[in-house]
Each structure stands twice: as structure tokens, then as C-alpha cells.
Amino acid sequence: GKIELHYQYLDTKRNSGRTYLDRLASFMQFKTRLNRIRYALIICSDNNALDFINRYGDRLYPDVPVVFCGINNYRPEMVQIKRPVTGVVETIDYEGTLALMDRIHPGRDQVLVILDRTTTGQALKEEFDRVAIKFQNRFSFDYYQDFLLSDVPGRISKLGEKDLIYLLTFNRDKSGFFISYTDGIRMIRSASRVPIYGSWDFYFGNGIVGGAITSGESQGREAGRMAAMILSGTSAGSIPVRTEGTSQYMFDFRQMQAYDIKARQVPEKSRIIHLPLSLAERYRNQIISLLAAVSLAVVI
């Protein structure tokens, strides 16, 4: 049957606090009553959306099943609503990215970790800490959280030949000023003389070298698959929460060139974007030859 999607944008990267959320919930309740809507399913994207449903869901959308996605630092007790719930956890491969940084840059041992103090930033800090301890004998980590946007370029420009940047989340400074993902990476890239690594596809291609990249598209696709099952009659409570990661090694060839990173230094089966046409054609021919060999092996 036909599925009609309604989007409720919380905009909590720009706005926060109980007063804002209370007023937003009241407005959403008004809209639902005005339009006489009865939702069949709710999809929550990111930690703040799940927190919102935990707090206001029973008042706004009682008994409607929930699918969540993009949840960082997931624990079962994060779900506090008594209704069928499932979802997909945003599992970030910090270890894979740090291992890349170790392998590609043996002479650099200082990592500036950029992350804000939004709900997502705080959750990421908890996750990252558990992995960083594995690299404590290799890297020294400096967490850059309490920043003013006006001070960021100056801080970044002071980094030198021993430094690397790991960009996690960079949306709001300590005064509450907001910056978009695109403007954030542009600010950091323009000020930086050192390689930048990351974990999300919205930074990839915009100035980071690469990393073990998590795709928002894959999160949405999995949440959509679960939603379709529920709308077809499957109980959300019977669908296991998906916790395994879906990251892929990705690199930007322009940044590889800028820091003299050779193709042999990156893992096999990495996705490399912005290859010159001559190289892209060469890799394409290698892939076609490989597929032909695999096909022949299967036929035999």
C-alpha cells in the first residue's frame, strides 16, 4: 500500500533546553490534532530524537511502534517507552581509523580530537575513550571540546609535523553558536596543515583524508527495511536491534596527494574518490579482470 512520510525536524543542533523541547512538543501535538493524524510508525534519527520520544512520546503518539537509527553509545536502558521498539545502532569504527592513522603516519603521535558538547558529542566522547586507551602507547590525545568558533582557526593553524586531527562532531561551540557540517569542515580544512581523519560520510570528500567511514545512507536503508517489516505485520519487538557496524575504508585521492600518501598504504578494497581519469581507468580495468577471474572460477 501507499506510505506517506511526515518529517518532524527537531533542530536540536541549533536549539536545546527543556523550554524549547516543551514548546516543540506542544506544537507537534497541536499539528497532529489539527490534521487528525494517526501514525502507524515512528522513526527516530539520532540520540536527541530518541530522547524526545522517551520524554514526550506517550503524550504525542501513544502506543505507536518505534524504529531508531543513528544512535551513539547505545545501551538498552536508553529506550524508556513501553511499546514495541527496535532499530539500528550507529557503530563507529574508531579503532579502524586510529589503526589507519598509525599505519600511514608513523612519524606523527599527537592527535587533536575535535568534538563538541552536544548530546551526540558527549556520547561520542564516551565511545571514543573506550577505544583510545588501546592506543595510549602510540598516540597522545588532546580533546578539543570547549572551543569558540572564532578561536578554532588559530588553534588548528598551530598544529605541526607531529600532529593529526580526528574530526568527530563540530556543530556548536561553548557559547551556543551553530555551524553546519559543511562550513565546519571548511573552516578546519582551510586552517589546517596536517592530515584530518573522520568517521562520517558527510565529511568525506570535503577535506578529510578518509577513515573507516560510516554511512548515514546505510543507517537509513536498514531502518527502512525494519519499518517495512513492521508495516507488513511484524512486531517491532520481535526484530533484533542491529548493533554490528557498517563502515567502509574510504579515501580522498586529493588529500592523499597533499600528504604524500601512497595507494599501497591504504587497505585493499578501500574506496578512493577523486582519482584522476587515467588512474580511475587503470583501477577499473583491474576490477574487470578480477571479476572475470572470479566468474571463471565459479563456472569451473
Image (cartoon, rainbow, N blue to C red):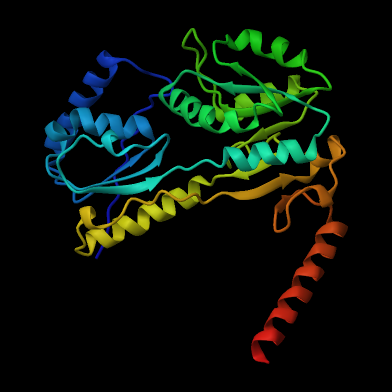
Q: Position of residue 11 (x, y in %)?
A: 38, 27
Left or right: residue 72 versus residue 32 is right
Q: Quadrant of the N terminus?
A: bottom left
| 70 to 109, vertically: above or below | below
Left or right: residue 151 versus residue 46 is right
Q: How many dots with numbers?
A: 0
The residue under the point 31% across, 36% down is 8
| 270 to 288, vertically: above or below | above
Which residue is farthest bottom?
A: 300
Q: Quadrant of the C terminus?
A: bottom right
Q: Position of residue 25 (x, y in %)?
A: 21, 26
| Quarter of the view holding residue 213 | top right
Left or right: residue 146 versus residue 66 is right
The residue under the point 18% across, 34% down is 57
Q: Nearer the viewer, residue 127 or 89?
A: 127
Q: Nearer the viewer, residue 111 or 21?
A: 111
Q: Position of residue 219 (x, y in %)?
A: 44, 49
